[in-house]
């Protein structure tokens, strides 16, 4: 668990394999009322991916498309994320992808649902689920996509633009890499190609790190070196 003051959702799951526990957690999260965001969102968007993934991506919160589909990163930001993952040689199906906040926060402009950034209280409330996911997946590396994700796991400790792209050993359990949120690549006006290249470079650094960590883990345990047990 990342924060000693927060009990993890995984602590209250006693029986079952990790897959079963993650499924159970996801089902519990469907009824989450830990903050008010459930009131207007369509559904909880829980994380998805490999249960023993080495790479664990955290975004901000589901967007309009994700809220409807019930899956993370399936809209425009997800499209560019997928393309960049591919360029960096990362297979998304071998990763775990989730968000700091599991409900879509928006305000209405006419009929359009405009994204609103979650506040610190909403992020903190959702740490219950994020900690649970982390405790069950136990990845080698957490990749925080953007400032909300970075603040959700290491509040006020790092700055994305200052600290991006390097492996930050920020606590005893996990290594962390910060990079920009994929939607930044859709918004940025100047140097879009360069920004995209830098994002892919950060992803390659993440891939290289987990590759090395897996080799090390194989040497030490004789396992396949996927996410930690
Ligand atoms: N942005 C995010 O942070 N997460 C998603 O799932 C989609 C868009």
Image (spheres, grey):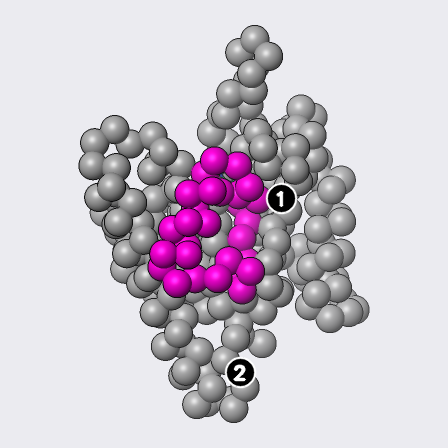
Q: CA distance from mark 2 to mark 1?
A: 28 Å
Q: Please give left or right for residue 37 compared with residue 75 in the image.
A: right
| Image location (x, y in percent) of residue 169 | 34, 65
Residues rendered magenta in the picture: 71-100
Where disc 1 sits, the SS reads loop
Q: Is residue 135 visible?
A: no
Tell me the tag on residue 187. Answer: none
Is any atom of residue 89 visible in this view?
Answer: yes
Q: Residue at x 50, y 25 (%)?
A: 115
Q: Which residue is mark 1?
A: 71
Of residue 131 and residue 191, the one placed in the foreground of this image is 191
Residues tagged 2 and 1 counted as in contact (Cβ below 8 A): no
Depth check, front residue: 2 or 182: 182
Q: Find residue 224 and name its label.
A: 2
SS for callout 2: loop
Q: Where the N terminus falls, by quadrant?
A: bottom right
What is the crowding at mark 2: few (fewer than 14 residues within 10 Å), some, or many (at least 20)?
Answer: few
Quarter of the image for the C terminus: give it.
bottom right
Query: Which residue is located at x 41 percent, y 55 percent?
Result: 85
Residue 229, compared with residue 148, is above or below; it is: below
Residue 188 part of the magenta segment: no
Pinpoint residue 57: horizontal percent, then vertical percent: 47, 54
Above-or-below relation of 112 to 194: above
Q: Is residue 109 left or right of residue 209?
A: right
Q: Residues within 10 Å of mark 1 (few under 14, many from 20)?
A: many
How many numbered tags mark residues here? 2
Residue 80 magenta-drawn? yes
Which of 221/200 is in front? 200
Residue at 45%, 38% in the rendered image: 77
Residue at image location 36% in from the left, 33% down from the top: 186
Mark 1 beta carbon near ligand 1 (under 8 Å): yes
Q: First in sequence: mark 2 or mark 1? A: 1
């Amino acid at each position: 668990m990342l924060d000693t003051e927060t009990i993890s959702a995984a602590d209250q799951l006693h029986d079952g394999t990790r897959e079963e526990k993650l499924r159970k957690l996801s089902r519990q999260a469907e009824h989450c009322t830990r903050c008010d965001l459930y009131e207007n969102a369509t559904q909880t968007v829980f994380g998805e991916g490999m249960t023993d993934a080495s790479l664990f991506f955290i975004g901000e919160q589901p967007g309009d498309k994700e809220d409807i589909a019930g899956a993370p990163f399936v809209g425009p930001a997800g499209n560019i994320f997928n393309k960049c993952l591919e360029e960096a040689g990362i297979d998304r199906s071998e990763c775990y992808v989730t968000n700091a906040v599991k409900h879509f926060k928006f305000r209405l402009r006419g009929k359009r649902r405009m994204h609103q950034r979650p506040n610190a209280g909403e992020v903190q409330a959702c740490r219950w689920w994020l900690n649970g996911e982390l405790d069950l997946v136990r990845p080698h590396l957490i990749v925080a996509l953007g400032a909300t994700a970075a603040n959700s796991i290491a509040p006020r400790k790092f700055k994305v633009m200052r600290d991006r792209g390097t492996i930050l050993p920020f606590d005893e359990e996990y290594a962390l890499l910060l990079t920009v949120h994929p939607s930044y690549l859709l918004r940025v006006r100047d140097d879009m190609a360069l920004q995209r290249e830098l994002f892919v470079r950060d992803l390659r650094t993440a891939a290289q790190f987990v590759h090395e960590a897996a080799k090390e883990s194989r040497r030490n345990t004789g396992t396949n070196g996927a996410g930690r047990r």
